[in-house]
Image: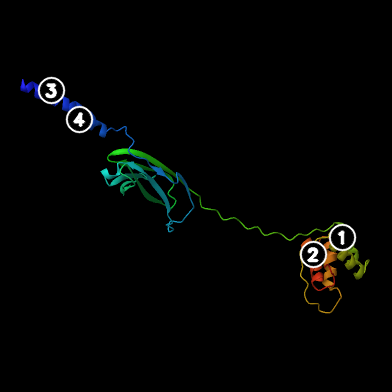
Amino acid sequence: MRVLHFSIFIILVSIMIIPNALASHDSDKQWGTVSVDKPTLELPYTTASNTQYEKIKIFGTVEEPRSTAFVYMTISEPDGKTYQVKVRVIADTNEQGHYENFILICCNSAGTYSVYVEWRGYHIGTVTIDVSAKPKSQPTDTLTAEPVTIIPNWIKTHAGWWAGGQINDSAYLLGIQYLIKEGIMVIPSTERSESSGSQEVPGWIKNSAGWWATDQIDDITYISGIQYLVSIGIIVVS
């Protein structure tokens, strides 16, 4: 009879203890949280010798912080490398604590990083960081602006008359000066130099005008003669 009573006692104790024991290890319980401050990250392009790191904070909370001292983070990198770190928990109260850790990312290491966090043997969450890297910037060609030159076609006719003596120097030069001032004829910007004191038109200028009128030289060569006359003050455009 005593054996029967003892057996009944053992059964009752088991009924009371086992559910509590199982409840304390219930995997459905939310033992903590995990978050990341930068779930996406764009890295600037860097050379291999430039090890400028970006810091990513992984942080969260845990229940019953005094039950153990650390959370464990398993970090997986885009190249397949995996490593584990343990992070100390700071107890805020008897019921809850917090933790934080930083991972460092650099050197054009694009891809997805994942951080798997465990507390007391339970998985409390996984976060990912999607990292992209800016491509290397390509050098751009610097374009040099061509000097602006506009010459109405009929000026060639007048240049031919001038070279042939049908128009005198004064009339021709005043005509060119007027056309430049009014924007009818446009030549590249020309700085005036110190005058030599002579106001005579050099012979090569008139010769150039004649050659230009018969298409023996191009516009640029002809304009260089006009610019020379501006630079020595024979033609005044300011």
The mark found on residue 223 in the picture is 2
Q: CA distance from mark 3 to mark 1?
A: 126 Å
Mark 4 vs mark 1: in front:
4
User: Which one is closest to the eye, mark 3 or mark 1?
Assistant: 3
Label 3 sits on what residue type?
Ile
Q: Quadrant of residue 228?
A: bottom right
Secondary structure found at label 4: helix
Labelled disc at residue 17:
4
Could you tell whether 225 is left or right of 76 in the image? right
Q: Are marks 1 and 2 in contact (CB under 8 Å)?
A: no
Work out whether mark 2 precedes mark 3 in sequence or the reverse, and give the earlier one: 3
In this rendering, does residue 106 appear at all? no
Evaluate whether residue 157 shows in this view.
yes
First in residue order: circle 4 vs circle 3? 3
Residue 155 badge: 1
Dot 1: what SS? helix
- Residue nearest the viewer, comparing 27 with 148: 27
In the rendering, at what x and y percent does residue 204 appear? 82, 71
Q: Quadrant of the N terminus?
A: top left
